[in-house]
Image: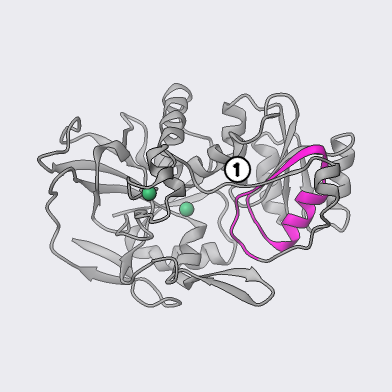
């Protein structure tokens, strides 16, 4: 089988050939049909996150071992199953939930594998879908997609469940406008609508992305680079936002998001762009503010998301398909901010 692996942080992915593995135990082997390219692949390829103030978080310190095949948004067809893999049939087309935990720690036993302390995520800590085949350790991470187009479903594995998990943390979703800052904005906007959200205010520094958000149904769009961006949100919401979902997570976006909150408001940070902000402490209790992080999604959240998608169809997010061989060029375009919506690779 062919695979594209990260061998050296900072370098391009390298094409490799290896024997196709055979599933053992509860493993399921998928033939890759679609593999989404995600912004976090850029961080993985770099090997670090910017913590602000000149500090870095190294992925090697977090357990990433090279070489590893990237690709964590995968749909494939079941081609072989281990003797203990029950309930999957050969030929079924499945979305693979990549957020796989150890199965033994507290969060894993509570169903929050996305908070596991020893994650084995596909395409991060174990081989992912930039390859002809992908091995999934257990059928419980597989979700049948039926006749839905693989390239429309693949982005749900990260972009979809990540924004779904963040939207689930907004108690005022149906009652008040939700502010969505950048990044996965179109996916978040589409799921916000499917979940019955009141209205969305989308903030982005890129005019093309603001235009796309407006066309996709955002009630208002705001230039995140404007000096008065937070004030514009406060004006539009008559006093401040009840909920901000920050899909960028930069010093600039955090400043805008946090500063636009109303009393009792919640700032949910999802994006991993990097940086830092300084926050005065007394207003947090006095204004009863919540700052909450949200990291990908749990298996129960993926299950709930897939039920929503089977009922209502895949999110209306622009998806471009490219050949797997073009993976390095696609990642360069993503880094340059040239991509609106998602790109999905097909082998
Ligand atoms: Zn991702
Ligand atoms: Zn665990």
Determine the secondary structure under disc 1: helix
Q: Quadrant of residue 273?
A: bottom right
Look at mark 1 in the image and give the residue it sits on: 186
Disc 1: CA contacts within 10 A as few (<14), some (14-19) or many (>=20): many
Q: Is residue 243 magenta?
A: no
Residue in the foreground of this view, choosing between 335 and 258: 258
Left/right placement of residue 189 relative to residue 223 reads left
Point 87% across, 58% down: residue: 227
State the residue lying farthest toward the left.
83
Point out residue 250 in the picture as x, y percentages from the top left corner: 68, 61
Point 40% across, 74% down: residue: 12
Point out residue 254 in the picture as x, y percentages from the top left corner: 73, 55
Q: Is residue 254 magenta?
A: yes
Point out residue 107 in the picture as x, y percentages from the top left corner: 43, 44
Q: Is residue 73 visible?
A: no
Q: Quadrant of residue 278?
A: bottom right
Which range is magenta?
A: 247-274
- Specify the quadrant that holds the N terminus: bottom left
State the residue lying farthest toward the top.
311
Left/right placement of residue 297 relative to residue 50 reads left
Point out residue 50 in the picture as x, y percentages from the top left corner: 60, 69
State the residue lying farthest toward the front.
106
Q: How many marks?
A: 1
Point 50% across, 50% down: residue: 342
Q: Is residue 4 visible?
A: yes
Left/right placement of residue 29 relative to residue 280 reads left
- Specify the quadrant that holds the C terminus: bottom left
The colouring scheme, among rainbow, by chain, secondary structure or one colour, is one colour
- Indicate if the residue with disc 1 has its beta carbon within 8 Å of ligand 1: no
């Amino acid at each position: 089988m062919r695979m594209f692996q990260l061998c050296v942080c900072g370098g391009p992915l390298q094409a490799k050939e290896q024997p196709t593995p055979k599933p053992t135990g509860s493993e399921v082997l998928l033939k890759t049909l679609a593999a989404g390219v995600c912004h976090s692949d850029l961080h993985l390829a770099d090997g670090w996150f910017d913590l602000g103030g000149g500090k870095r978080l190294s992925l090697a310190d977090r357990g990433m071992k090279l070489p590893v095949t990237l690709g964590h948004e995968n749909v494939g067809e079941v081609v072989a199953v281990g003797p203990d893999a029950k309930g999957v049939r050969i030929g079924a087309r499945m979305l693979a939930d990549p957020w796989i935990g150890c199965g033994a720690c507290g969060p894993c036993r509570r169903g929050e594998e996305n908070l596991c302390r020893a994650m084995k995520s596909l395409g991060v800590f174990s081989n992912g879908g930039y390859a002809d085949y992908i091995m999934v350790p257990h059928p419980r991470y597989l979700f049948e997609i039926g006749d839905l187009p693989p390239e429309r479903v693949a982005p749900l594995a990260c972009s979809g469940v990540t924004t779904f998990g963040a939207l689930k943390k907004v108690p005022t979703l149906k009652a008040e406008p939700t502010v969505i800052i950048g990044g996965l904005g179109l996916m978040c906007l589409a799921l916000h609508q499917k979940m019955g959200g009141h209205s969305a205010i989308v903030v982005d520094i890129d005019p093309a992305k603001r235009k796309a958000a407006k066309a996709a149904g955002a009630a208002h769009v705001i230039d995140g680079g404007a000096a008065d961006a937070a004030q514009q949100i406060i004006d539009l919401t008559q006093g401040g936002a009840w909920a901000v979902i920050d899909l960028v997570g930069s010093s600039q976006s955090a400043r805008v998001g946090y500063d636009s909150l109303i009393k009792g408001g919640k700032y949910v940070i999802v994006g991993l762009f990097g940086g830092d902000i300084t926050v005065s402490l007394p207003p947090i209790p006095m204004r009863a503010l919540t700052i909450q992080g949200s990291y990908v999604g749990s298996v129960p959240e993926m299950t709930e998301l897939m039920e929503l998608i089977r009922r209502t169809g895949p999110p209306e997010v622009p998806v471009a398909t490219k050949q797997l061989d073009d993976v390095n060029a696609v990642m360069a375009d993503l880094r340059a901010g040239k991509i609106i919506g998602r790109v999905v690779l097909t082998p």
